[in-house]
Image (cartoon, helix red, strand yellow):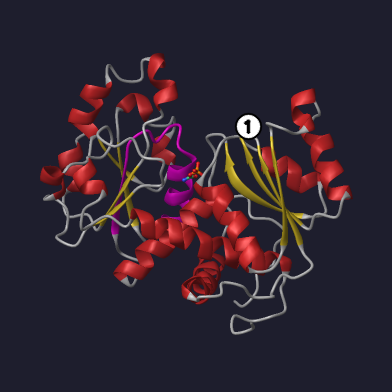
Amino acid sequence: MTQLHRKDILGLQDMSSEEIQLILDTAESYKEILSRSVKKVPILRGKSICTLFYENSTRTRCSFELAAKIMSADTTAVSTAGSSIQKGESFKDTLLTLEAMGMDLFVIRHSASGAPHFAAKILKSSVINAGDGMHEHPTQGLLDMLTIRQNKGRIEGLKVLIVGDIMHSRVARSNIWGLSKMGAHVRLCGPRTLLPAEIEKLPVEVYDNLDMALEDVDVVNVLRIQLERMNRGFFPSVREYSALFGINKDRLRRAKPDVLVMHPGPMNRGIEITPDVADGEFAVITEQVTNGVAVRMALLYLLLGGGGHVGSA
Ligand code: CP
């Protein structure tokens, strides 16, 4: 496969392993541009990209903007603060207004699951889901897979543990779909109250006990505890959560000796992960961020059909 035959990237559940492979291969070839002294190629010159964020973001928004700028596209950033969304303009009218200005592609983050799917239906322009509610965060899933592939040389056959608040996590869902399509064995571990309904329908193994879940794993992906949900009684206290489900050096000894420790960020240091692990020899958390730029460059290229190639300067 050499091309993505789709207008939008809305999730990994409906993506084939061949498409994922193409995106990861393209990202790997584009990553080299990030180490050049002049990080600029003309591949998307003349294309207009809008980042439309209804929720806060550092990594996803900045890396999409950077990816677009490196590829010479023009970018427009719209967020709820400072836009006419504050005056009550609807999501639909906001989309149609921005498309009428000539946007070729929208990167959308929204608290409502399905918002990017709605946008993709009403827009002729391409849409990339930058995180929708508790549904999916496909670019995070892709950058996580790229990081695993680069460090381990493969994804197929690896044991990958995702720990934490699975129920509310769009990162977990995209990782589960993507990793299982690429042949990894996915384990989940977290408080029972933070596991999704109908978990038996997902291609995963579920563990209550973190020490058992960690046994012999190749990768641990630690999810952020969403402190904003703490007052809803999902677990008794942060202290208890850390004691039962926090990743620390002692616990990591149960995993493979070359285990990778990942976290999508932002991290709550000292809660779901101890600082010595977050900054330690097994952590690839900043590498994930760098790979995020490469993956987003690849997606912009594949969707907007840039005609240039990596070597162009
Ligand atoms: N991982 C992630 O989506 O981070 P941001 O919320 O900072 O974009």
Q: Quadrant for residue 283, please give it.
A: bottom left
Q: x%, y% of residue 165?
A: 37, 33
Residue at left offset 14%, top offset 46%: 249
Query: In front here: 106 or 219?
Result: 106
Image quadrant where one finds the C terminus: bottom right
Q: Is 109 on the left or on the right of 75, as rendered?
A: left
> In the figure, 128 relative to 191: above or below?
below
Q: x%, y% of residue 28?
A: 48, 73
Residue 124 seen anywhere in this rendered image of the structure: yes
Instruction: Name which residue type carries label 1.
Output: Ala
Q: Residue furthest bottom?
A: 311
Residue at left offset 17%, top offset 42%: 248
Q: Is 60 on the left or on the right of 214, as rendered?
A: right
Residue at left offset 23%, top offset 35%: 246
The magenta-colored residue range is 159-183
Query: In front here: 217 or 97?
Result: 97
Tell me: is circle 1 under 8 Å from ligand 1.
no
Q: Residue furthest right?
A: 100
Q: Quadrant for residue 45, please give it.
A: bottom right
Q: Which residue is mark 1?
A: 112
